[in-house]
Amino acid sequence: MCEISSSICSSPIGHLAIDYCPQGLHFIIQVPTINDKTFIADENQPIEIVSTTGKDSLPKSCLQWLDSYFHSNEKTLITPELCPTVITKNDSFQANVWRTLLNQVHYGQTVTYGELAELAGNKRAARAVGTAMRRNPFQLIVPCHRVIRSNGELGNYAGGVRNNTKVWLLKHEQN
Ligand SMILES: [Zn+2]
């Protein structure tokens, strides 16, 4: 079993809650209070640890990734260590969708639900891809914001409650 520590980090899209163990990240998400009603982006907000519980400090690889993502023009980011128990050693279709999105849909690109299903090996599984996006354990790092509808609409983010975040992230990646 992994011993989990947790940190809250500031970012341009608000505070991020991050869980990790000595092997890597387990979970990253905007704090639960952020939704379309309370979302305010500040592109100048630095990445800083606000608080930590547990015995380990947030991995530097995660801080560096977040800083590069929000504050550099570097488009090829080095994925921070992800605990293997979360997606690498998980042979479900859902985990395969997460890995495919992580490895094949790069900064500034978008993909449709159907295209991602096909890339993950089952082109009829667009609906399952939607479910996998809602359950994505690694917001931003596994870039579910880059998955859009086939008619060109952006589609929902976090089940529809964070669509403004999705709009902001996609615009950020075009700069
Ligand atoms: Zn772990």
Image: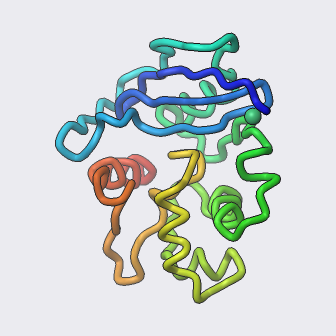
In the picture provided, is 151 more to the left or to the right than 135?
left
Colour mode?
rainbow
What's the residue at 69%, 65% (across, down)? 100
Q: Quadrant of residue 6?
A: top right
What's the residue at 67%, 77% (across, down)? 119
Above or below, comparing residue 129 to residue 39 in the picture: below
Query: Looking at the image, which residue sits at the far front?
Result: 1
Q: Nearer the viewer, residue 100 or 90?
A: 90
What's the residue at 35%, 77% (across, down)? 152
Above or below, comparing residue 73 to residue 88 in the picture: above
Above or below, comparing residue 124 to residue 119 in the picture: below
Q: Position of residue 121 (x, y in %)?
A: 71, 80
Q: Position of residue 133 (x, y in %)?
A: 50, 61
Query: Looking at the image, which residue sits at the far left?
Result: 37
How many numbered callouts? Answer: 0
In the picture provided, is 106 more to the left or to the right than 147?
right
Q: Position of residue 85 (x, y in %)?
A: 77, 45
Q: Nearer the viewer, residue 107 or 157?
A: 157
In the picture provided, is 5 more to the left or to the right than 167?
right
Q: Which quadrant: the N terminus?
A: top right
Q: Position of residue 10 (x, y in %)?
A: 42, 22
Q: Quadrant of residue 63?
A: top right
Q: Quadrant of residue 96?
A: bottom right
What's the residue at 33%, 47% (across, down)? 165
Quadrant where ligand 1 appears: top right
